[in-house]
Amino acid sequence: LTGALLLTGCGSGQIGDTGGAATDPGNERLVLITGMRGEPFYVSMECAAEAEAAAQGYELNAQAPERFEQAEQSQILGSAISTRPGAVIIAPTDDQALAAPLRQAKNNGIQVVEVDTALADRSIAVSSLSSDNYAGGRLAARTLAELTAGRPGSVLALNTKAGTSTTDARVAGFEDEIREHHPHLTLLPSQYTDNEPATAAQVVSATLGAHPDLVGVFGSNLNTGEGAATALANAGRSGDVPLVGFDASPKQVEDLRNGRVQALIAQDPARIGREGVRRAIAAIKGEPVERETKTPMIALTRDTMDEQSEFFYRSRC
Ligand code: T6T
């Protein structure tokens, strides 16, 4: 695949002021709140964040909701704020609902750093680190178009939950790229899956039945991709209907190797976690930090995957 290019991260932004009330520069406690417990993207982020915090002599308290769900995440955030850490490093599971408690944190002098997902309100966090998710969606579309080898038909994008900044941007990028550059492909309306693999599998099974001209599927994150791979395998259509996933969990990597998935857009969660801690510490010290940073992404295929194994995610530290 010639579409398998590396999108490298480059900062795109001004240097932010570390706003809000002053943080006590001696406050060496950080809280990391990811989107979901035990999920390899977040595990990889957390392991790197813990190592970086330890290397810098900071305490890092890592927490996450059981499910990718804003109500439970808000509760965790509320308790974390009451312990008055120097910074909260967070992957908000909703781009609106987490704004009020994070604004409160900022007003209490706690530095807020966004990792991966982000709030729609850009005035709260001092710094945000993520893949360029819109570009990642475009890369997924180019990769899928190439896998269809000119065969005309429908393509389906699976989203997670409305209000998830990352997957919303990926699906938007995917759709724009197909519409603008791949006229042999027809976009079916994208579908939400509640970030549940079983729901993603059901949607793909139903779509195979309703649209016999289906020639490709894009799973915009780990859970949607894992669910889609299961549905295609159960229908005996692996490879015949190419699947491009996002992320590189151990299961996704295995599915790429055994032909249940044809390409994966892998992110660099470890770098996001490590840099998130660095930004938080710099902000606590009152040093300038870059407001927006994009981290690397790469399209993995079976032929090239082992040359890029540093992009594989881990399920434990
Ligand atoms: O794709 C990642 C992350 O980037 C996204 O924001 C939510 O889903 C994942 O954690 C994978 O499950």
Image (cartoon, rainbow, N blue to C red):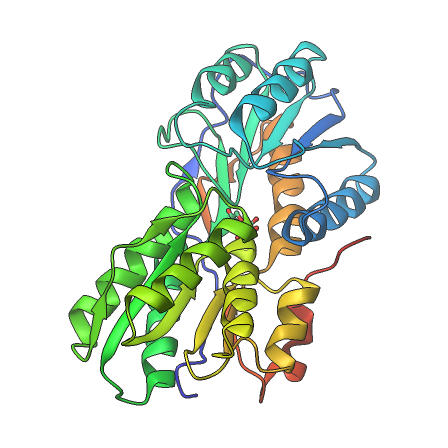
Residue at x 37% of width, y 38% of height: 162
Q: Quadrant of the N terminus?
A: bottom left
Camera-nearest residue between 18 and 87: 87
Examine the rendered structure and indicate whether residue 160 appears above or below residue 262: above
Q: Position of residue 48 (x, y in %)?
A: 73, 50
Number of residue marks:
0
Examine the rendered structure and indicate whether residue 276 appears above or below residue 18: below
Q: Position of residue 180 (x, y in %)?
A: 16, 69
Camera-nearest residue between 205 and 109: 205
Q: Quadrant location of residue 175?
A: bottom left
Q: Quadrant location of residue 284?
A: top right
> Is 73 positioned to the left or the right of 199 in the image?
right
Residue 165 in sight here: yes
Q: Position of residue 166 (x, y in %)?
A: 43, 47
Q: Position of residue 34 (x, y in %)?
A: 63, 37
Residue at x 63% of width, y 77% of height: 308
Residue at x 59% of width, y 30% of height: 283
